[in-house]
Amino acid sequence: MSGIVFNYKGSYIERVIGVNNELDLLANSGQTEIMIQNISENTIFFIYPADNSESMEFFYILEGSLSLEFDDQKIKLESGDYFISKDLKTKAFFKTETDVKFLYVSDEPVFHLISTKVKDLELMRKAVEEKDMYTHAHGERVKDFSVKIGEKLMLSNAKMSYLHYAAAFHDLGKINVPDEVLKKPGRLNNEEFEYIKKHPTDGEVIVGDTFIKEAAIAVGQHHERLDGSGYPLGLKGDEICIEAKIIGVADSYDAMTSDRPYKKGMEPMDALMELKSLIGKHYDELIVSKLEEVLKEEGLI
């Protein structure tokens, strides 16, 4: 997204409806999320301390009134008032006196915790791993390695957020691959491999239909390689986004070190040497070096 994007009254990226509240995600940029929240009259709700003491949540009351007791004070807030949560030590209790509408801004991702679409993606990921029992927890491992590499590369908060989601959901497109192809022991023939080559694009479409659509491009590119020998588009070098390059390394490492019914997984050092032999052809040298640092820190090599 660039420039100015116009949206009109009633539009939103995703809406989640609860018993006494409704939350609409209006915009997000990896870390910052802008939302509208509606809470019914006479509802008690809480604001919890954040995991990160530096994170901030901002609430501007567009309509209605509410009350709370905080630091031994009874406070009433009405339309036009606002409050900010930063470095909160204990949860704060609020009660709406009327129906209330907030403009809610968070500089840490929170919407994914309640998003029905993200929950659907999680269920789909489990279904993919059940289709191919030998990739059980593969997505979680690739996500963990990818995020650790991204941290060492000091990616921006936004790119780290996209990397996290893209790595976790990179194989969702395999939901459309026939079981007999996905579970086939040994080498695939050309027709069968064509099914496999479609899964990055299918995954990009699936993730692109959610509020984390900025992560979709990395899903679509995670099998591209620096020399253009990858798929589905045969992209080269800087045509491939950094998140996809990271996932490509983490994905390949995990695939090499995982046991299959027809092949035992490689030892971590042997897999690293294989990755190093393909630096400049398939993989980025700096990314492979950061993976090596992670493996050393975790005592794997």
Image: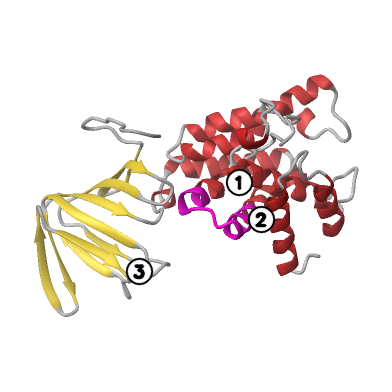
Mark 1 neighbour density, 10 Å: few (under 14) some (14–19) many (20 or more): many
Disc 1: which residue: 167
Q: Is residue 7 above or below residue 32?
A: above
Q: Nearer the viewer, residue 80 or 295?
A: 295
Q: Which mark is residue 145?
A: 2
Q: Is residue 22 visible?
A: no
Identify the mark nearer the N-term, 2 or 3.
3
Amino acid type assigned to the residue bearing label 3 in the image: Pro
- The secondary structure type at the circle numbered 3 is loop
Q: Classify mark 2: residues with Cα within 10 Å, few (<14), some (14-19) or many (20+).
A: many
Task: Give the total number of marks visible in the rendering.
Answer: 3
Q: Nearer the viewer, mark 2 or mark 3?
A: 2
Which image quarter holds the N terminus?
A: top left
Give the left or right position of residue 79, taking residue 258 as reference.
Answer: left
> Can you give x and y, in whole percent of width and height, for residue 204 in the image?
56, 32
Give whichever of discs 1 and 3 has the lower sequence position: 3
Expressed as whole percent of the image width and height from the top left, the position of residue 11 reads 27, 32
Q: Which residue is mark 3?
A: 49
Instruction: Give residue 149's position: percent from left, percent from top.
Output: 64, 56
Q: Say whether residue 160 is left or right of residue 175.
A: left
Q: Quadrant of residue 195?
A: top right
Q: What span is in magenta?
A: 146-161
Considering the numbered disc 1 on the image, is that residue within a helix, a strand or a loop? helix
User: Could you say where residue 285 lies in the image, as x and y percent from the top left?
Assistant: 73, 49
Whether residue 28 is situated above or below residue 300 in the rendered picture: above
Classify 10 Å Cα crowding around label 3: few (below 14), some (14-19), many (20 and above).
some
Determine the residue positioned at 78% across, 29% down: 181
| Residue displayed at 68% across by 26% down | 232
Q: Nearer the viewer, residue 140 or 145?
A: 145
CB of mark 2 within 8 Å of CB of mark 1?
yes
Q: Is residue 158 magenta?
A: yes
